Amino acid sequence: MKKKNTNLTRREFIKDLFHKLLLLLLGSFVVSRFFKSAAAGYVWQIDPKKCVKCGRCATACVLTPSAVKCVHAFEICGYCNLCFGYFQPGALRLTADAENQLCPTGALQRRFVEDPFFEYTINEALCIGCGKCVKGCNLFGNGSLYLQVRHDRCKHCNECSIARVCAGRAFVRTPARKATFKNA
Amino acid sequence: MRKFRLLVLILVLAAPGWPAVATAAEERFPAPEFETQYEIPTPAHPHPRQDFFEYLDIAVLLAALGLAAFFAIKKRSRLGLFSLTFFSILYFGFFRHGCICPVGALQNVIFSFSGDYLLPLGVILFFALPLLFALFFGRVFCASVCPLGALQEAVIYKPIRLPQPIKHVLGLIPYLYLGLAVLFASTGSGFVICRFDPFVGFYRLSATPFMLLLGLGLLLTGIFIARPYCRFFCPYGVLLGIFSFFAKKHLSITPKECIHCRLCENACPVDAINPPSPRLYKTSKAQQIKHFGIFLAFVPLILATSGFGFSRLTDVLARQDRMVSLAERIHQEETNVATGNTLDSDAFRQEQTRVEDLYRQAARIRHKFYIGLWVFGLFFGLVISLKIIVLMQRPGRTDYTPDRFHCISCGRCMEYCPVQSDGSVTET
Ligand code: SF4
Ligand code: SF4
Ligand code: SF4
Ligand code: SF4
């Protein structure tokens, strides 16, 4: 009987030792990380300079349609009549007929402002983030159209499924508080 | 006028809080000077969730863990634990959409040691709090807080007991999964746990067909083999198990003394109840010590074989890294082994990084994989050895007790015990 008792206490003692050891380990981990922690979380953002408009944004997101949409920086738009993001190359007439449009869903909308300028806006509900218009605009136009993760739609996956396959490796984990890229 | 507009543009873009704008823009066409009252619109930039929610998440996690510990240990209420499960499905699952969960946070933790990625405070706590609770109260996180576990908990209907050998072999998978996740996170190659999270798709209400099938398959399996992901895959469960093993307090099946009625024997859905050890063993104590000694002599051999074996996987696994596979592709293209370019190799050439730099980076990552796989192999060898040593032990248990490593503190067994808290026994 006596022997069993000492046996038990030895076990208890070892258990207690490991308990304290693990507590110490966890504690020192938290403390050491705490002083180098970021206050807010991260979001995924596309660096437009690196994006090659590969089209995977439309297909790789865990959401359908994708959380990536085309965004228009009106500030640098030329308001061109012949918009390279809007029209198919070699479109016969510069009208809003579907066969002239580059966008497969008609999400890029064209509106006459004043002669000779046209305003182009994106209907996000229709945009699937395929980047066809972005490609056209960047190749021949001012590059005012760009793809970006829309944070109201994005689920903020711990590992973004698009980032994993993005041809330009353009996805960056960005601190949520300053989701921005400085103008180079 | 144009100069001014450009200046404004630069100022606006450089202002913090302003999301990315295509900066590679070339002004091929001058900005128009409007004669009408047209105002240039600014695109809307929706903000992600407010910081407030991150603090709320932490508070809710803490409260849920506390409540689970209370139900499991103090109140001994299976009903309480079960209700909390549904709350977790709703809050951590459907409201919070799963990410970042403690299981996945494991990878962020590893990743933060290797790169210049700073761990957000929320992630530190999501990783550490369940472990802390496990160290004091057992795996109460698994009982009713984990959104992955909760979904599986809800479908358990007729759990069967797996044969012991199968259970032990399948039980090794989480260690492999843990090793793999750490390897990929530490080389910066990706987060495997998140990539193959079978349940998060339900919470996002959107998943690829493959992940949907995997998730449904696991849930269907879970009707009969309780908590298949938790027991045979979850890498975080390994850590929780270790912490729970050394817990200060732990859920107990009986409120007083076990009367060996054996009513609880089949109550556990995850087969985590240890019966009392047999009184008599076939081998004598001396023989047992001898066997133990012989086995110990083999341990270095097991470690070396395992380490070496794993290191042979370097090429296969390193290729899963994007930079390594890109470097291989570029090399094949440069040496005309492969014809044509891929979208990725085109993109790389546009970047105008030197090919040598890419090769060097890929070699560095491959080397990390090599070292990592040796460590992984040694770790796995150690796990196997320890498992065998534990199986050789004579634990000297006198009562029916939960296996502290594998018990998920679900509280089912408590309902089977006829002993009351005042020590009386109800007849059944
Ligand atoms: S983080 Fe998830 S939801 Fe957001 S863009 Fe990437 S894959 Fe889509
Ligand atoms: S996946 Fe990357 S390169 Fe392709 S369109 Fe999206 S951001 Fe651009
Ligand atoms: S074992 Fe893993 S998946 Fe299951 S409840 Fe615990 S932490 Fe969640
Ligand atoms: S609480 Fe009881 S029934 Fe539930 S896992 Fe633990 S030992 Fe099994």
Image (cartoon, helix red, strand yellow):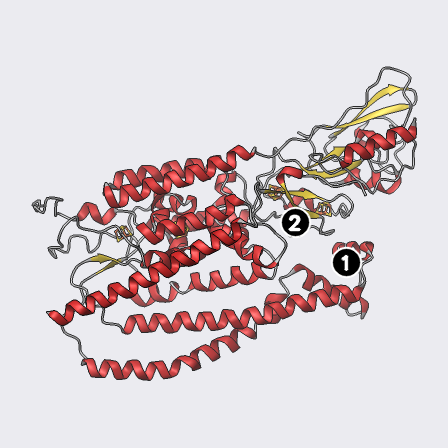
Q: Residues within 10 Å of mark 2 (few under 14, many from 20)?
A: many
* Foreground of the two, B360 or A88: B360
Q: Chain of mark 2?
A: A
Q: Which mark is residue A155?
A: none
Give the image quarter of residue B366. Answer: bottom right
In the depicted structure, whether residue A13 falls above or below residue B88: below
Q: Which residue is mark 2?
A: A163
Report, in whole angstroms, how far the alpha carbon at label 1 lies from the one at label 2: 16 Å
Q: Nearer the viewer, residue B254 or B339?
A: B254
Q: Tell me the quarter of the image containing the C terminus of chain B.
A: top left
In the rendering, at what x and y percent does residue B282 appear?
A: 17, 78
* Amino acid type assigned to the residue bearing label 1 in the image: Ser
Q: Quadrant of the N terminus of chain B?
A: top right
Query: How many residues crowd around disc 1 within 10 Å: few (fewer than 14), some, or many (20 or more)?
Result: some
Residue B345 is labelled as 1
Q: Position of residue A121 (x, y in %)?
A: 77, 27
Q: Judging from the image, what secondary structure is the residue with disc 1 in?
A: helix
Quadrant in the rendering for residue B35:
top right
Horizontal relation, residue B180 to residue A19: left or right: right
Estimate the x, y position of residue B296 in percent, counting from the top left.
35, 81
Pointer 2 residue Cβ closer than 8 Å to ligand 1: yes
